[in-house]
Amino acid sequence: MTATDSRGSATGRPYAIITAMGGRRDRLDPAERRLQSAFFRGEELDLKDAVVRADVVADLVTRAVDRAASPRAALRLRNARIVGRLDVRQADVGVPVFLVGVTITDVLDLTNACTAGITLIECVLPGFHARLLEVRGDLNLTRCRITGPADLRDARIGGSLTLDGATLGDSGTPDDALAAARMTVSGDLSGRSGFVAYGRVWLSAATIGGDVLFTGATVHSSRGPAIDANRLTIAGSFSARYGFTAEGGIILVHAQIGNQLNFTEARISTTGIWALHLGGARVATLWLTFAAPPVGRVRLSGLQADSIFDNPATWPAELDLVGCSYRLLLARSPAPRGSPLPPQSVTVGQRLDWLRRSPDGYAPQPYEQLAAHYRQNGQDQEARRVLLEKQRQRRATLNRPKRIFGYLLDGVVGYGYRPWLAGVWLTAFWALGTLTFTVQPSTPRSDTAPERNPALQSLDLLLPIINLGHDGAWRAAGASQYISALLVLVGWMLTTAVVAGLTRLLNR
């Protein structure tokens, strides 16, 4: 049944409540009458901890206000205690709501409601149910204490969602402190300045038009990840910097982040598997400059980033890099807050240790990606060392005959990435041949043989293409025949390796 209030406006609320608000004012206590009067004038009212019934508040914010008579109507209330369940489900709240220091004894239920801007500052309430809520402006819960779950699944917020300094859940919360899957926020999602969540922050498939700001926040989750944000889409940055702590890990699988994903001076730990999971994510710039090494496994598999900045002192013990691609990889040193992080040099040996942190063993792509990075920066020697290490790691996965052959290739020519080794071996065998033909001189094949020269005879045998006129003119005798055969075989093998290595070098 629908009634009309004293100003002739249809309220859509049950008759008993409307009569109390309109025709029978004697049912309102003095605090509620003051609230009604202040509401229509749009004035802020400080009730100094007086009690107001939730039904009275709900009736005020959901009634159809005559804007000609009350153009400034709004709920602006300080230091009150609202008793009962504040139920505005599926209602149209057409006036601004501004509560400061208000305690609500039961759940605030905004499920499927449509509202103007809502501001709750330093309020205390046992739960916030707002699934499918539509807010035309901002939703501000600054420094609120919500002991039960805050449910914003499928909500649509036309402005920003502010949780700065708020506390969601309590130490006994087993599941979600903030359930905001599929939520859409046109502006920023801000949880800074001491924001604490006891339970999971669930942002899967949410869309944020601005930035996600968790600098200085703390998220505790006893079950599963602290932040679960699969397929999260952010137009700006995800900032979880100085003082940010996540106990339970962060999941950002297939997230799309338009600018930075920044964990500078953050602390992340988990008792499960994943401290940080960025599998398949897309991000412009990734800052892995943690305050301490993450406790748990970090997965960057399939990540696509333009730039990655990290700090060798805080590399995780377990790191997955298969399929991770980047154009720029730089190390940064810690710096005071507000100062830019200075660059630090990282040797190729350190970067190889970085690659070897995968608990799943050898994979070729991370080595090829790092080598490509070095080549793009003109560091060809470092690139060759990375590719040589790739072959050595691959060798450990082969059967015994192939491993033996691999050791031979490595020792002789460094798998072709160290062609100068072939020159060293050629010099050693040249010296061996020279010594052999000096101790055991060869005999001339004809009277036209040139003057005997052990060094040139040995070199002629080692160089299979060039003819110096000594190999065919002198016949080795005794044991030197075997040395001659060895020099021919080694010459073909090492010369081929040198040519291949020089060709690879010139092609780059």
Image: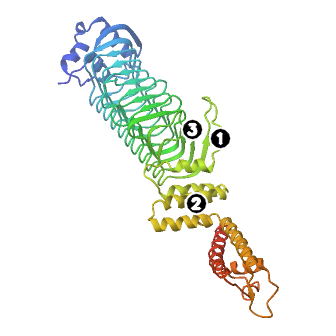
Q: Residues within 10 Å of mark 2 (few under 14, many from 20)?
A: some
Q: Residue at x 66, y 56 (%)?
A: 379
Q: Position of residue 168 (x, y in %)?
A: 37, 25
Q: Secondary structure at mark 1?
A: strand
Q: Amino acid at mark 3?
A: Ala
Q: Earlier in the sequence, mark 2 or mark 3?
A: 3
Name the one closer to the observer, 245 or 13. Answer: 245
- Tell me if mark 1 has few (under 14), some (14-19) or many (20+) residues whose alpha carbon lies within 10 angstroms of its own: some
> Which disc number belongs to residue 94?
none
Disc 1: which residue: 343
Q: Which mark is residue 388?
A: 2
Query: Mark 2: which amino acid?
Result: Leu
Of marks 2 and 3, the one in the foreground: 2
Q: Answer with left or right where residue 68 lies relative to residue 490.
A: left
Q: Residue furthest right?
A: 451
Q: Residue 181 sits in which quadrant?
A: top left
Give above or below for 459 relative to 353.
Answer: below
In the rendered view, how is the structure colored?
rainbow
Residue drawn at x 23%, y 17% is 18
Q: Quadrant of residue 458?
A: bottom right
Residue 62 in the image: x percent, y percent? Answer: 30, 24
Q: Residue furthest bottom?
A: 447
Decide which of 223, 295 is in the foreground and name it: 295
Q: Which residue is mark 3?
A: 313
